[in-house]
Image (cartoon, grey):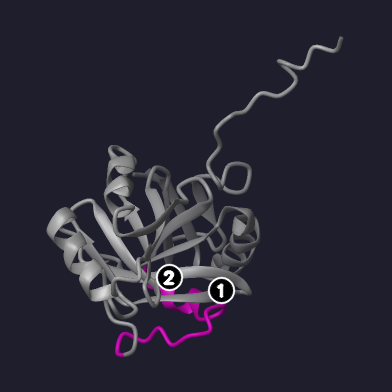
Amino acid sequence: MVETQNLFAWTKRHAWQGVLADGHYGKAGKSGVTVRLRTGPGIATFIASTEGHVAVGTAIRERLGLVLPLTPEALCAGHLQAVWNGPGQWLIIADNRERFQETLADLAKFGAVSDQSDSRAVLSLSGARVYDVLAKGVMIDLHPANFPIGAAASTSIAQVGASLWRRADDLAGPVFEVMVARSFFGSFWSWFSASAAEFGCTVQDEIQ
């Protein structure tokens, strides 16, 4: 009888392992774009029940302190973010997975919840030239007048489906977070690294 017990060894891997690493890419000198890797966020999709989005949002705000945006926005409450993902649908993102299952259990009382933590890749993009890079592949207008801090969109970037939202600016300039399916991360990074090369791109240590 063939022994199969040890034929496969499952090892946890981040979405970018084997695709990119910390360091500098493209043009030498000061980087126009900085990429920060998100390694440990808890991610879930949440679809509200038929009770009504406003009623569900009120109940969740009272229970978790989390406001569900009713328009394409990303709202923060402590370590949690709610990103609008369509009518009655949101991405729920926690800074880390500590007690994340408890949060999902609370949400499940008000709709359908699916843990997506290991199926998505999240990057934080910033820098003085981040607009120039994103303009090469994002098919929506990201001008601050049309896409202010807190704005969110479900869109495509270089033909890869993505969720994109803008966070508060840092000292280097505007900050965007982008989320893509893990299986498409290699394609996304191939496009992004080529698009950012002319401005110089730094990939920083992983952040929580």
Magenta highlight range: 127-145
Location of residue 42 with respect to 47 vertically, above or below: above
Residue 185: x and y, percent? 59, 56
Q: Quadrant of the N terminus?
A: top right
Q: Is residue 77 left or right of residue 43?
A: left
Location of residue 147 with respect to 165 vertically, above or below: below
Q: Is residue 131 left or right of residue 120?
A: left
Image quarter of residue 208:
top left
Q: Which mark is residue 157?
A: 1
- Disc 1 crowd rating (10 Å Cα; few below 14, some 14-19, many 20+) is many
Identity of the residue drawn at 44% across and 57% down? 123
Magenta residues, dominant SS class: loop
Residue placed under numbered mark 2 in the picture: 164
Q: State yes or no: residue 139 in magenta.
A: yes
Kind of residue indicated by mark 1: Ile
Query: Which secondary structure, mark 2?
Result: strand
Q: Nearer the viewer, residue 149 or 129?
A: 149
Q: Are marks 1 and 2 in contact (CB under 8 Å)?
A: yes
Identity of the residue drawn at 57% across and 65% down? 192
Q: Nearer the viewer, residue 36 or 9?
A: 9
Q: Is residue 196 left or right of residue 53?
A: right
Kind of residue indicated by mark 2: Leu
Q: Nearer the viewer, residue 159 or 204?
A: 159
